Image (tube, rainbow, N blue to C red):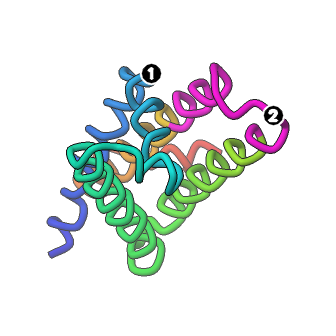
């Protein structure tokens, strides 16, 4: 069961890699599902994809919470969740100062994706190759 839990890293890692390399498309898509008004204006295909995206995001979040609560690598999971929270706060701050769209948000998405990829790979390698690999956190 533990192996299945840690194998869930693979779709989350693919999601973050997609966000890193297709930031403009990911930003445009997230913008269409960000508010109720924008979500209501879309067609049924957009609504279905939006629901799928939100379901995936909730599973990703719950996986992180379970990892913090039950894993021996709780610190890595806490950092992963904390980085997502910081990214969301940066997006809210940019919205509050009058920069709702643009390069700064995409830069924030890229930075979040890079750090999330590093943490997901760290969690994966520590679980499956702990005899060879020690956590990045041990460097600090």
* Residue 79, picture quadrant: bottom right
Q: Residue 33 got which mark?
A: none
| Span shown in magenta | 94-112
- Residue that extends furthest to the right in the rendered view of this protein: 97
Q: Label 2 to label 1, Cα distance in Å?
A: 20 Å
* Residue 128, picture quadrant: bottom left
Q: Quickly name the residue at label 2.
A: 98
Horizontal relation, residue 135 to residue 79: left or right = left
Quadrant housing the C terminus? top right
| Label 2: element kind | loop
What residue is drawn where x is 59% and y is 42%? 139
Q: Is residue 98 visible?
A: yes
Measured as percent of width and height from the top left, residue 73 is found at: 44, 65
Magenta part mainly helix, strand or loop?
helix
* Residue 63, picture quadrant: bottom left
Q: Quickly name the residue at label 1.
A: 24
Residue 129 counted in the magenta span: no
| Label 1: element kind | helix
Measured as percent of width and height from the top left, residue 30 is found at: 45, 40
Quadrant housing the N terminus? bottom left
What residue is drawn where x is 47% and y is 35%? 113
């Amino acid at each position: 069961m533990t192996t299945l839990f840690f194998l869930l890293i693979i779709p989350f890692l693919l999601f973050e890699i997609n966000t890193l390399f297709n930031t403009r498309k990911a930003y445009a898509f997230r913008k269409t599902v960000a508010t109720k008004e924008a979500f209501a204006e879309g067609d049924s295909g957009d609504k279905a994809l939006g629901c799928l995206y939100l379901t995936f995001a909730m599973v990703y979040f719950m996986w992180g919470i379970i990892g913090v609560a039950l894993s021996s690598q709780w610190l890595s999971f806490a950092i992963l969740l904390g980085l997502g929270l910081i990214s969301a706060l940066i997006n809210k701050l940019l919205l509050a100062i009058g920069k709702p769209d643009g390069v700064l948000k995409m830069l924030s998405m890229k930075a979040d994706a890079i750090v999330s990829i590093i943490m997901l790979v760290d969690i994966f390698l520590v679980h499956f190759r702990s005899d060879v690999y020690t956590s990045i956190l041990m460097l600090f």
